[in-house]
Image: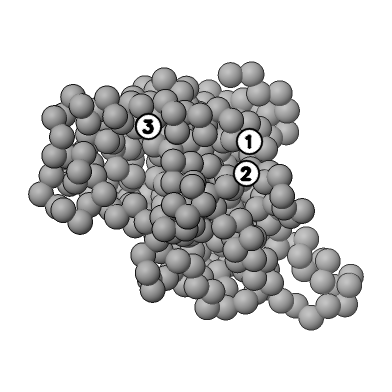
Amino acid sequence: MEAQGYFEFEREEWQKLSKKAELPLTKTQLAGIKALNDRISLGDVQDVYVPLVRLLQKKYADFEKWNQDKLDFLQVPVKKTPFIIGISGSVAVGKSTTARLLQVLLSNWFSDLKTQLITTDGFLFPNAELEKRNLLSRKGFPESYDMKALIKFLSEVKGGQGQIKVPQYSHQVYDIVADQFDVIDQPDILIVEGINVLQLPANESIYVSDFFDWSIYVDADAELIEKWFLERFGVLLDTAFHDPTSYYYKYAQMPREEAFQLAHTIWRDVDLKNLEEFILPTRFRADVILHKVQHHVMDRVYVRR
């Protein structure tokens, strides 16, 4: 991958940029953090994420100083402004693991700072609304999100508002859960994870990424992501086989070959199309790109110059 405007580091170079640290989690705890079918080891955390957090620490210090200097100059009363990190990438690439792991590391190493995490899944229109708009087959595409609500949410977070409710999304039922909310309450650091966070919607004058102070894109070749997508689908079939409430139960009842053929079609017609048209073009809008190869191994890191 050619990445003009970025410093490129092979993993061996990147890991040397920071001293080894005592990790605040065990192998078992790490297994509980990683996304379904993702692979990550404590060695990955040490080699890739420790330098990443150290770099983030420096960015946060600059952010705090700039905000203080700005408020002093403008003679505005001091008000806490959250530092917002956006994390993007394809479906099944492992961006959820990156988001959760960053939250754990930041919460443990900087315990005086309140770090919260939210995904943009909660801003998808409910399935009933998508059906009404004839968009159910476009779920995950830009038009399937309530972007006005997402931008309003980020504006409220940046403005220091407390107790902000965000609808919960369930991957098990593949829909927004009625009357269930996550609450974001004046964090020092907010991590926002989703496939759409770096996109530039055509009908909005303000973009989601306008609110970000740092952004990360988790990257891999499309052929690999498809492989991971299908592997994850297989795990979901196994877990849904005896659970009629699961969205994947109907697929689990099919002959396995037929179910996988259908999953391949969904990847080709929906997720790959979304990746190529709307997600991948945002890659070079990120401040940091984490590149993966076989077995979810991160082999390179790119940092914007």
Nearer to us in this view, 135 or 43? 135
Question: Residue 282 shows which numbered tag?
Answer: 1
Q: Amino acid at mark 1?
A: Thr
Q: Amino acid at mark 3?
A: Ile
Which badge, 2 or 1, comes first in the chain's sequence? 2
Q: Nearer the viewer, mark 3 or mark 2?
A: 3
Q: Residue at x 67, y 37 (%)?
A: 285
Q: Is residue 299 visible?
A: no
Q: Residue at x 47, y 55 (%)?
A: 132
The residue where tag 3 is placed is 266
- In the rendering, at what x and y percent does residue 89 appear? 51, 38
Q: Amino acid at mark 2?
A: Leu
Q: Residues within 10 Å of mark 3 (few under 14, many from 20)?
A: some
- In the rendering, at what x and y percent does residue 205 appear? 77, 53
The residue where tag 2 is placed is 198
Q: Is residue 1 visible?
A: yes
Relative to 115, residue 248 above or below = above
Relative to 261, residue 246 above or below = below
- Left or right: 230 with respect to 80? left
Q: Residue at x 73, y 28 (%)?
A: 5
Q: Secondary structure at mark 1?
A: helix
Q: Nearer the viewer, mark 1 or mark 3?
A: 3
- In the rendering, at what x and y percent does residue 133 appear? 51, 52
Q: Secondary structure at mark 3?
A: helix
Farthest-out residue, bottom: 77
Quadrant of the rendering where the N terminus is positioned: top right
Nearer to us in this view, 106 or 158? 158
The answer to whether the residue labelled 2 contacts the one labelled 1, judged by CB atoms less than 8 Å apart, is yes
The answer to whether the residue labelled 3 contacts the one labelled 2, judged by CB atoms less than 8 Å apart, is no
Q: Residue at x 89, y 72 (%)?
A: 74
- Left or right: 258 with respect to 10? left
